[in-house]
Every structure is written in structure tokens, then in C-alpha cells.
Amino acid sequence: MEFYVISLLNSLVFGMLLFMLSSGLTLIFGMMGVLNFAHASFYMLGAYFAFQISQFAGFWTALVIAPILIGLLGAAVERFGLRTVHKHGHVAELLFTFGLAFMIEELILLIWGRVALNYQVPSSLDFTIFRLFESDFPVYRLFMLAISVFIFVVLYLLLTKTRTGIIIQASLTHPEGVGMLGHNVPRIFMLVFGGGSALAGLAGVIGGNYLMTSPSMAILLGPIVFVVIVIGGMGSLTGALIASLLIATLQTFAVGYDYSLIDLLAVFNIELGPEPWFPDLWRIKVENTGPLLPYLLMVIMLILRPKGIMGERES
Amino acid sequence: MLGVKNLNAYYGRSHILQGVDLEIRDGEIVSLLGRNGVGRSTMCKAVMGLVKPHGTVKYKGENIAGLPSHAIAHKGIGYVPEDRWIFPSLTVLQNLQLGQKDLKKQSRWSLEDIYQLFPILEERSKLRAGLLSGGEQQMLTMCRTLMGDPDLIMIDEPTEGLAPKIVELVKNLISEIAKRGVSVLLVEQKLTIALKIANRLYVMGHGKIVFEGTPQEFQKNASVRKEWLEV
Ligand SMILES: Nc1ncnc2c1ncn2[C@@H]1O[C@H](COP(=O)(O)OP(=O)(O)O)[C@@H](O)[C@H]1O
Ligand SMILES: [Mg+2]
């Protein structure tokens, strides 16, 4: 019981953090057709910026300033980079974001070095909010959840209740059609790219101190975010939400199971001989498969339903 | 109002528009006819800035060739594409609201006008536009463009695949549009309504204009009809 409640809470926290990253990525892809490989790099920059800013202005200032800076940076990347590269097609765009991701990583290595930073949870949020059964639940996790739920609500209202939001939604299906009605689509692209980057940055600000702030954090989380938007359906926000929670739950719960294939066979009263083929394979425990599960799910999804849970397009 | 001179356009290496000349005067209904694939839609898209135009596109005395399509829309040109491009996940009302480009400017067409012309759009205003029938989607696309109050509207094959009753509605709407002082370019293939309402006609064949004249002149010219229109 305790395991389920705690794991469920943790899934929710991690899932909403994932959503903060995947929502921007899926919107950018849905509107512009750009798979932004540098998206997780903005997440990483968010954490590094937050560390630097909090050195002299404190965490709360960093919480506001860092995402804004990342957002401006993202908008500039769209305006002066992607928009020009766009004329040469999607492959060029893909390579551009690839290059950008590596550039950001190298810059971080140059400025902050290879070692993980000592970016810590602010002391005002570093205590236990409640004890659940036998374990402590840190207040910071609740804070992360509150921030990401707040962002979710704001994003939802922006997209469904404002004129700009409606224009963004329309651009998901027919950007050309939106432009010819008199809306400045390139400006909307810049806005969405900047907004998506800001959200990724914010995820870095609140996630970097809790998880880890190191030059590998983009590589560690980036692929998972991709998996999320593929499973959710490229371009679908609802899909991204469902998939974020799904992946987070899968990974969180897997950690708690130390069963292996041997245990499964035992249920059916099958026993392996003393020297089975691939002896190690049978002993792999579910708890160790956590990192594998998202990719497995993505591969299965691509075979069974290539457009994802909520995707509109076929490919 | 619109003067197209020596307009060329390309898709990759294929030369689609090969020096098109075409004129639309204030308040006219002009029809652009031609078989499938001759470049009529490309011509509209080149004027609208959706396809890169090479040549001159003069609108109200100003060369607009090369401007982005949102800027061309703000100059006062509207385009109703043949595949309609409705926004399926948005409601009918939201689709119409997206047509407005300037919320402060007084438009010839208010939402009430539109609803009066097509009560069905009011009935379905809260419905997702993707759920409308083909005819209703056609009405919606035309009205969406009207909400932006264009002075010139290019309507691409609006009657294609519609039942005769709906075709009649489309025809009446185009007459109403012209009555309110909007110039119209009506693209057609099968001469469903063009002969009844157009002031002048152009026939296009393989990226060039091959005939220009009044409906009467066109009726008399059997060879043009035979060579460029009938299958
Ligand atoms: N997006 C496109 N890419 C490549 N070729 C196209 C594209 N759209 C149209 N074409 C080609 O351009 C020619 C003219 O097309 P179009 O302007 O749509 O003709 P029409 O509207 O008169 O039927 C056709 O041969 C068509 O195959
Ligand atoms: Mg056409």
C-alpha cells in the first residue's frame, strides 16, 4: 500500500515535469514540423542559468529570470537561425537543431566544466512536508508538482481561451491557411518556440536542483521526452500529458519490482534447468528494466498505432 | 484593382505558370476557367503569396509580388482554397473568428450577417468544424474569408462535388458578395455557375491564358471550348 501511494505521487511529480518539456516540443513539432533536438538542451541551460543566478540573487529570482532568459534565447534561435534554415527543408532544420544541441553542451563544458554543479534545493523548501507510512515526503516535490500543475492550467487557458491560442491551435493543422487569413505566422512560430524553450528552461530550474545539474542531463532526459511525444502523438498536447504521466508511472513503478522471468515461470510451475540458455537473461529484474521500458513502449506503439495515442497525422 | 503581368511560378523545376496576364476591375466578377492541372490554383496562390511569384502582381496600384501572405491579406485580398483548409478541431465560431484580421476595423460582414445568410452556421456554431458536411464546410470557408473583409476575393472551385441545392446557395452568396462591392475571381472547371454570374472570363491552358472575353463571346467561340475545356 505504502509503495503504491508513494510511487503514485512520485509518478505524478515526474510526469508533470516531463509534460513541461514535452508540451513545448510537441507544439513546436505540430506547428513547424521541426523535431527540435535542442529542446532538452534548453532544459539543461535552465538549470545552469538558475544555478548562476541563484548565486547572487537567490532561488526565487532565478525561478523567474532563468526561464525568461531561456525563452528569449529560444525566440532568437528561431528568428535568426531556424527561420533562415527553414527555406532549405526539414533535413536542414533537423541538422541545425542537432548542431545547436552539441554546441550548447560544449559551451556548458567550457564555462561550468564536466563535474555536476552544486545546485541545491533552496533551504526554505528543504524540509519534510509529511511522513507517509514510513517515508518522508519532501516539500520540494510538492512544490515541483504545484509549479507544473500551475503551468498546465495557464497553458490550457492560453491555448483555449485567447485569440493567440486559437491561432496557435489552427496553425497545428494548416499554418498556410492561418497566414493567408492575415495572421503573422512567422511571429507565432517565434512565440511558440520561445514559449516552449521557456517551459523547458523552467523544468530545468525546478528539476536541476532536485535531480542533478550536469552536462549530461540533456542527454539523459532528451530521449525520454521524444518517446513521450511519439507515444502521445506528435502535435497533441493532450497526448503529451497522457504519455508523460504514463511513462513516469511506468518508470517509477518498475523500480519497485524485483521479479525476474524466473519468478514468472515459477508461477506456471516451470523450472529452468541448472544450465539454461542465456542464464543472465532469465535473471533480469523488472526494477532494472526501468530505462528500457519507455523505448519498448515506443517501439510497440510505432508498430501498432504509428500516430500515437492522440495524434492526428499518420506519419 | 488587380493587374497580373507576365506571372511565372514554379514547383521545384516544373514551370507551372508561364507568363500569365490577367486583370480584375473594381466590382467585377471574373471567372478563371480551365481543365484540371493547368495552373489555376497556382495562379491564385501566387497572387496570395503562398507560392513564390515571378513577375508583377499589382493590387490597388502597388506591386505586392514577394510580400508574405499575411501582409497580402491585410492589403485586402482573400483566398478561399479548393481544399478549404478548415480548422477541424476548432468550433465553427472559432473558425469564423479566425477570419477576422483586424478586430477594430468595421467590416462589410458582421457575424450576424453571416448567420443570417447561413442559419446553419449559427446552429452549428459550437460544433467542431471537422464534423460539418462538405457543403457546410464550403460555406464556412467562404464566410471565414469574408469575416476578414477583403476587397478582392479569389474563390477556388467552390461548387466542386456539391449537390445542386448547395451550388445554388454558393451562387447566391457570390452574387451577394459582388453586390457589396467586393471584386471576385471565381475559379471553375465545369462552368457550373461562371456563365451565369461572371462579367468576364479567362480560360487557362498549360500555364498560359488562351482566351479572354465576355460570356457571350465565349459562348460563340466553340473552338476554345472544345480545345481547352471539354474533355
Ligand atoms: N504542391 C505541388 N507540388 C508540385 N506540383 C504541384 C503542386 N501543386 C500543383 N502542382 C502541379 O502544378 C500543376 C498545376 O496545378 P494547379 O494549379 O493545382 O492546377 P488547377 O488548379 O488548374 O487544377 C499541376 O500539374 C500539378 O500537378
Ligand atoms: Mg485547382
Image (cartoon, coloured by chain):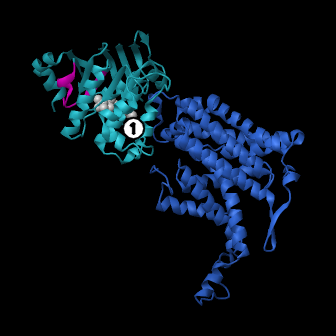
Chain colours: A blue, B cyan
User: Is residue A106 found left or right of A120 in the rendered image?
Assistant: left
Callout 1: SS? loop
User: How many other residues sit within 10 Å of disc 1, few (<14), some (14-19) or many (≥20)?
Assistant: some
Nearest the eye: B78 or A35:
B78
Q: In which quarter of the image is residue B141?
A: top left
Chain letter, disc 1 residue = B
Residue plotted at (70% across, 33% down): A72
How far from the left and from the top, in percent, is residue A57? 87, 39
The quadrant of the image that shows the N terminus of chain A is bottom right
Query: B125 above or below B100?
Result: below
> Is residue B93 in view?
yes
Magenta-span inclusion, residue A2: no
Type of the residue with mark 1:
Trp
How far from the left and from the top, in percent, is residue A167? 51, 36
Mark 1 within 8 Å of ligand 2, using the beta carbon: no
Which residue occupies the extreme top position in the image?
A: B61
Q: In which quarter of the image is residue B151?
A: top left
Residue plotted at (59% across, 89% down): A270
How far from the left and from the top, in percent, is residue A180? 44, 28
User: Is residue A98 found left or right of A182 in the rendered image?
Assistant: right
User: Is residue A12 found left or right of B176 in the rendered image?
Assistant: right
Residue plotted at (28% across, 20% down): B179
Magenta-span inclusion, residue B185: yes
User: Is residue A29 found left or right of B213 in the rendered image?
Assistant: right
> Is residue A28 in view?
no
Q: Quadrant of residue A34?
A: top right
Within the displayed image, which quadrant is ligand 2 positioned in?
top left
Query: B129 above or below A186?
Result: below
Residue at numbered disc 1: B85
Q: What stretch is highlighted in magenta?
A: B184-198
